[in-house]
Image (spheres, rainbow, N blue to C red):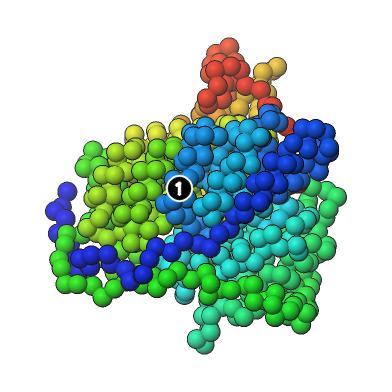
Amino acid sequence: MTDLNVEATVNSDSGLTRSSTKQDPMWGKIEESENFAKNVKHFRQKKLADDDFRRYRLQHGAYGSRLQPNYSMVRIKVPGGLIYPDQLEKIASLSEAFSIGSAHISTRQNIQLHWVQLEDVSEVIRGLAEVGLTTREACGNTVRNVMCSHLAGVCPNEKFDSTPYAKAIARFFLRNPMCQNLPRKFKINCACCEDHGLARIADIGLIPSIIDGRRGFRVYLGGGLGAASFVGHLLEDFTPESRLLATCMATIRLFDRHGNRENMARNRMRYLVQELGWEKFQKLVLKERSIVEMTTSTKTAGLFDIGAEQEESLSPRALDIKTVKLPIIEEQVLPDGAPYQRWLHGNVIAQKQPGYFTTFITLAAGDITANQLRILAGAIRNLSEEASARNTPHQNLAIRYVTAANLPQLYSKLASIGLANPGALTISSAVGCSGTTSCNLAITNSHRLAKEIEYRFLELGLDTDDSLRDTTIKISGCPNSCGQHEIATIGFFGGASRVGATMAPTYTMLFGGDSGEFSVLAKPIMRVPAKRVIDTIRRIIELYKEERSFGGSLKEWIDKIVRGEGIGKVKDIEGMKKLLSAITQLPPADQEPEMYRDYGNDIKFSAKTARGECAA
């Protein structure tokens, strides 16, 4: 290992000019906790019909737990993914008191508490409101959590920080009467640049843009993942920030008016866009926007306050002239090298602010214990100049504005609580939805499979191979895309296969997805037994390495195969299927009974599902 002798100037003290650690204005309301408790009593007394209570429960962020109607998954809305230390500490306490002693970060920057007794949900809502958090409209047919790139404000390629816009949109639509009973859930994503933020797989996706000195956005409409997925369409070349609210309102109003309320399988906005055709839908949005601009009162428009969402003067101070040793993050590391160097290589990136770094905390499939939350909150408070963190769509946490001098201390603190695993930004950090651990619709245990992949790939040192670094693995427990498998380099969604009278857990494997502005949806390749997924991925990597002389990363190699442009022995998808067939064959149950058990289960597999609650 080369000596770390890169010199940089950093500030000798706090590093940022800010008068205090600003907390967001309150999102939660105590009275919603009280109302929830009353409605649970009415439901138990049969004074509320099942469907009416279900809609109410979902609107307040309480999702039904797998096959257990008396338990809920409580989904906490985290607008823009921005979370503060005291909020993490409160979530830790609530998870111990009312959940299973841990929390889960979803692919939409929410934080979830699983297996909460229905009667305890109101206490969770109350506790969250005390620290400015809410569960309101985290589920149901409403505007869901507004996402924002975890790199917004620090990305070298962004035109401006989209965080205040994401928060302003979230606050405007929260509890807004116009979006309390939409045909189906509605999602808005804000990017920082073309590559980060998932702008084209949301109902509304926003990418910051500047033209002639004016701020605005490239607005994409009608994207989304699921049993049928679509990539969003560009509304117009440039939407100035002054028209952002009207554009969002017009789109939601059209969806509310024309969306399919009869067929739940086809009532997301992307189906409406597909059925009408993009050109017609585009004209309807532009016309509706003009109506919104003419009829919206000044008072209503004033509720969309971007300035109120700005952080307090969060800008680097002039750097003092002081030389320190700075980590060589881009340098190649070896699996048996120093753990700290390996962590730097796979978990730390430089910000556009000189001397500051963003560190990524590897969470296995998004899980974090109460004790880890508490210690992590203290580390964020003491070692991040921003004094906050961001949830990422990769189910990890990003701690930003860490100075070079504070990186070793942060690593030590993380290592003390088992959160210093390397590879957060590499192939080893697999994404997995909650699967059969809690979801009614899940067929397979995608959650456990994602963890198994991470453990195994870290053990093999695959996080240190830079040719694999930009490859993503994403797993869903059913064809719905909570694990975002359709934008993965290698994606999987759960299913079942029958051999004779016996069922086995299997996954459909997909290739070639991408989530940037030029998003590409992955193509289905073949079915793979659940217990053969890791072996299959390893075989794909072996085939790639055999052809590495042709150049390019694993991701680039897979993209060529999907296009039928392979120049080695694997020329196209059919060629790949033939080379993988020996691994992916499902053997008879009497020969390999383990193939007929899912991860985390010692009994024979059965495909049990119940009524889903993705919609109210």
Residue drawn at x 75%, y 57% is: 180
- Rendering coords of residue 89 (x, y %): 44, 45
Q: Nearer the viewer, residue 258 or 469?
A: 258
Residue drawn at x 14%, y 53% is: 3
Quadrant of res 147: bottom right
- Rendering coords of residue 217 (x, y %): 57, 74
Residue drawn at x 52%, y 25% is: 600
Q: Is residue 393 visible?
A: yes
Q: Nearer the viewer, residue 616 or 513?
A: 616
Vertical order, 162 against 341 (above or below): below
Kindly give the residue lying farthest to the bottom in the view shown.
212
Residue drawn at x 58%, y 68% is: 168
- Rendering coords of residue 190 (x, y %): 56, 64
Vertical order, 598 against 111 (above or below): above
Kindly give the residue lying farthest to the right in the view shown.
262
How dense is the environment of label 1, judged by Cα within 10 Å: few (below 14), some, or many (20 and up)?
many
Vertical order, 597 against 134 (above or below): above
Q: Is residue 516 visible?
A: no
Q: Is residue 516 left or right of residue 30?
A: left
The count of marks equals 1
SS for dot 1: helix
Name the residue that disc number 1 marks.
Answer: 88
Q: Amino acid at mark 1?
A: Leu
- Rendering coords of residue 184 (x, y %): 75, 53
Vertical order, 548 against 177 (above or below): above
